[in-house]
Amino acid sequence: MGRIKKLLYALFILFFLVGCNATSDSDGETPKDTNNEEVTSDDGVDKPSTDDEEEAPEVEETPVEEVATINIQEYFPPENVIKHFRGEGNEYASEVETIFQREGEFLVSLGNNGGTQVLRVYQLTQNGIHLVYEVPEYYEESPPSVASLQEQFQIQDVLTVPVEKGRMINGWEIVDIAHELTLPIGTLNDVIVLEKTNGNESMNRHYWAKQYGLVKKEFYYKNEDAYELMVTTELEKVEELPQ
């Protein structure tokens, strides 16, 4: 009977140790790595899951090149001034232009080159400079009123927006919009240059500057394959018109 008790006691100890080992193995199980766990999307396709979403590559924005815009009003002829031009090439290259008080959009001038006097009326708008009236052989000391001439106006564009190289304005081509020009009155920047060819025989070139309007005129005659400068008229000084 004592031997049976000892046997039962030994079996009890054995079952106890086996149970402890099983519990220990279960508790010490290493958790699965879920970082790369496959996730099924709504469309049924298995996709790998990551803790951090992949960042989209940064797209560099291409800088927009700023296009310089020209304020056409800065090139309007001034009012109440006398512009003196010196000339080279012939006896009528010099000129004196008297520009009177502006009347609304209109500006009247008298240009005298020693051979004739020309009456001109300009219209100045947001769109640019327009010649609306021109008559040579006008020899009165003062111009007529703008109202008395309006029925005879015929608009011709002189310098209008957009001011861009290569653009044609009434037969004149804009060949430069940032020319540097040295004259007796000083060095001028951002000068607009226009050219007009007269068939294959000659060419005219005009220069327009800020605050002065037209400041230089050149006449070229074509000699064989090249143009030769023949006549120059350029601004020498500006004085106020006596009131």
Image: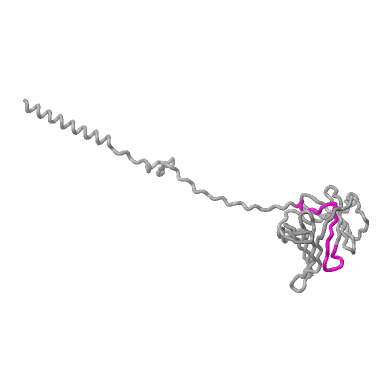
* Residue at position x 63%, y 53% in the image: 65
Q: Is residue 13 left or right of residue 126?
A: left
Percent across and percent down for residue 127 are 76, 51
Residue nearer the viewer, 223 or 201: 223
Residue nearer the viewer, 119 or 230: 230
Percent across and percent down for residue 229 are 78, 69
Q: Reply above or below: 39 against 229.
A: above
85 within the magenta span: yes
* Residue at position x 73%, y 51% in the image: 71
Quarter occupied by residue 30: top left
Percent across and percent down for residue 164 are 71, 57
Q: Reply above or below: 114 against 4.
A: below
Q: Give the range drawn in magenta.
A: 72-94
* Residue at position x 80%, y 51% in the image: 124
27 within the magenta span: no
Quarter occupied by residue 182: bottom right
